[in-house]
Amino acid sequence: MQVAEHETALDVTRELSDFLERRREQIAQRWAEASLFRAVFTVSRDEAVEACKAVVDALAEVARGGRPEDLRAPGFDSVREQLGRMAASRAKAGYTPSQIAGEVAGLREPVTSLLRAEYDDPADPRAQANEIALTILIGTLRLVVMETTVDAGEELIARQRQQLLEVATPVIRLWDGVVAVPLIGTLDSARSQIVMESLLEAIVDQRARYAILDITGVPTVDSLVAQHLMKTVAAARLMGAECIVSGIRPAIAQTIVQLGIDLGTIITRAGLSDALAYALSQQGIVVSPRPAMGGNAR
Amino acid sequence: MTGPFATQPGPVPVLVLGDVLLVTLQGDLHDTAAERLQQDITQRIASSPAPVGGVVIDISGVEIVDSFLGRILAEIAASARLLATRTVLAGMRPSVAITLVELGLTMPGLDTALDVERALSLLGHPSPAAPTTHPEEGA
């Protein structure tokens, strides 16, 4: 019984696959009119028709495999990238994922009408079975499109996160032997790790004696952020450089005190300029105005 | 039993540069060798006829410092300080520094320098900054 049922199901999907291949041209022509394809392939209609044909071929192949509900069917592989591009361009045009899904679902209608025309009697069980299989198939296509949309979004987020990490941690050489890192944004463990690595590398490269961590751009300092700061300071000290934390705004100073965080082992200064002045004075460098402007400086 | 060229398992050589003892660690340091080094250094400081100006431990050739070696280094510094000698740890690699910090071994009582040259100048002409500004908690 089970086997027989399976057999008929396979028959149905095979029949559906044959139908899709037979009507490939017509389906493609109709789909090319649909908003999903028309909006993406704006340059030429032929291009849209070609894209439609590729999708029809993929559907036919999946149907031939006998598992129209299989999201991972190898038949989808050929069009996955194309669908992704289409979904991405729709998303760029301001469409929500559910709207895109709706558009994909809209592809079913033209095919269904063609399928109905195949049978004289709409009550024919084979016609109904075919229609159900087609519905499942289009549903799977919709899922595939959604998946590619989500994947593209995740990829974008990952890439931007990486860019943010790279952009946010420049190490600046302020003076001979003095480097500074202006920290901007929330300091989480991933970022503090990168800050620490790039700062230590810079200390070696620049042969720096003093490293300034400027937290002017850090919106809040909690115990976790303070812990990250202390770790960075300790690591810089192990490398033989002295670390100065600067840019502590009054509100942050109050928060640190209220939280009871002990930054007693860290040298702190109010501003970056104060920190630089400290580093210079420790090295015996004196910055003073010229005796007379435009006069004999040296 | 160790010959003059038995570099791998043998003791770590302690060089004398003026009044400074210089120890250069290379590669992996065996636990027993580390303990032996600790004894060597303290003995050299104690038995030296002239006062020892300082100990410089160069770890620029060390890729991995585990918690044991970290503790030994801190103990060397602590025991040298009991004998009125400063210890400077020189040339730590960034990756080693990160590892030690993650292990919680920040070595508060130890002086550090970027390389041996700076360590020597730190011992020879102590600038007003270096000794006073480092928090010497373990003292």
Image (cartoon, coloured by chain):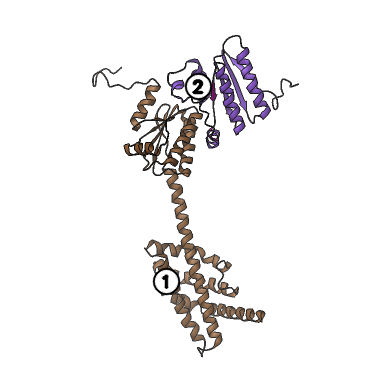
Task: List the single residue furthest toward the bottom.
Answer: A121
Q: Which residues are magenta?
A: B87-95
Q: Is residue B90 magenta?
A: yes
Q: Which residue is mark 1?
A: A103
Chain identifier, purple in the render: B
Label 2: state its secondary structure. helix
Crowd band around label 1 with a 10 angstrom C-alpha radius: few (<14), some (14–19), many (20+): some
Is residue A226 depicted above or below B81 in this figure? below
At x 49%, y 19%, the residue is B122
At x 46%, y 26%, the residue is B135
Q: Disc 1 vs disc 2: which is toward the camera?
A: 2
Q: Which residue is mark 2?
A: B118
Q: Quadrant of the C terminus of chain A?
A: top left
Examine the image and state in which quarter residue A44 appears.
bottom left
The x and y percentages for residue A8 are 62, 81
Is residue B121 depicted above or below A103 in this figure? above
Label 1: state its secondary structure. helix
